[in-house]
Amino acid sequence: MPLFISSVINSVTGAFKSLCDFLKTSKEHQSETAVLKENARFKKALNAAEDIIILIYKYLPLLEEDDAEDFKKLVEKFKKND
């Protein structure tokens, strides 16, 4: 179970990095309407990530100590970039 949660966290982090990179490059080449659509999708992705974080917090006591600390650090990093 802890390995699954750790891999979920890594997947979410990777997805957000890819999404942010995509949004940065696409903004340079798209019209304002397209950018607004992308921002709406980005907000949906952020909402899903927040739901994932809330869900994982329920299982935090089941994580190994190192994984729990890594999760908390990633959540803080997420909050700074939100």
Image (spheres, grey):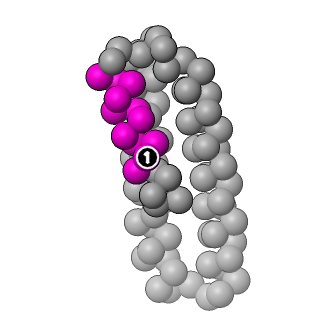
Query: What percent of the width, then of the height, locates residue 60?
Result: 49, 20
Rendering quarter of residue 55 = top right
Tell me the kind of residue under disc 1: Glu
Crowding around mark 1 (Cα neighbors within 10 Å: few <14, some 14 to 19, many 20+) is: few
Q: Residue furthest left?
A: 66
Label total for image: 1
Residue 30 position (above or below residue 5)? below
Could you say where residue 27 lies in the image, as x and y percent from the top left? 51, 81
Residue 19 shown in magenta: no
Q: Which residue is mark 1?
A: 76
Quick check: 33 above or below 79? below
Residue occupying the point 41% across, 35% down: 72
- The majority secondary structure of the magenta stretch comes to helix
40 or 79, nearer to the observer: 79
Where in the figure is residue 68, as x and y percent of width and height? 39, 24
Q: Secondary structure at mark 1?
A: helix
* Residue 67 painted magenta: yes
Q: Quadrant of the N terminus?
A: top left
Q: Is residue 71 above or below residue 59?
A: below
Nearest the viewer among 72 and 14 is 72
| Residue occupying the point 29% across, 22% down | 66
- 48 with respect to 1 (left or right): right
Is 37 placed above or below 76 here?
below
Q: Position of residue 59 (x, y in %)?
A: 54, 17
Front-most of residues 70 and 46: 70
Residue found at x 47% / y 85%: 28
The residue range painted magenta reads 66-77
* Image point (49%, 52%), residue name: 79
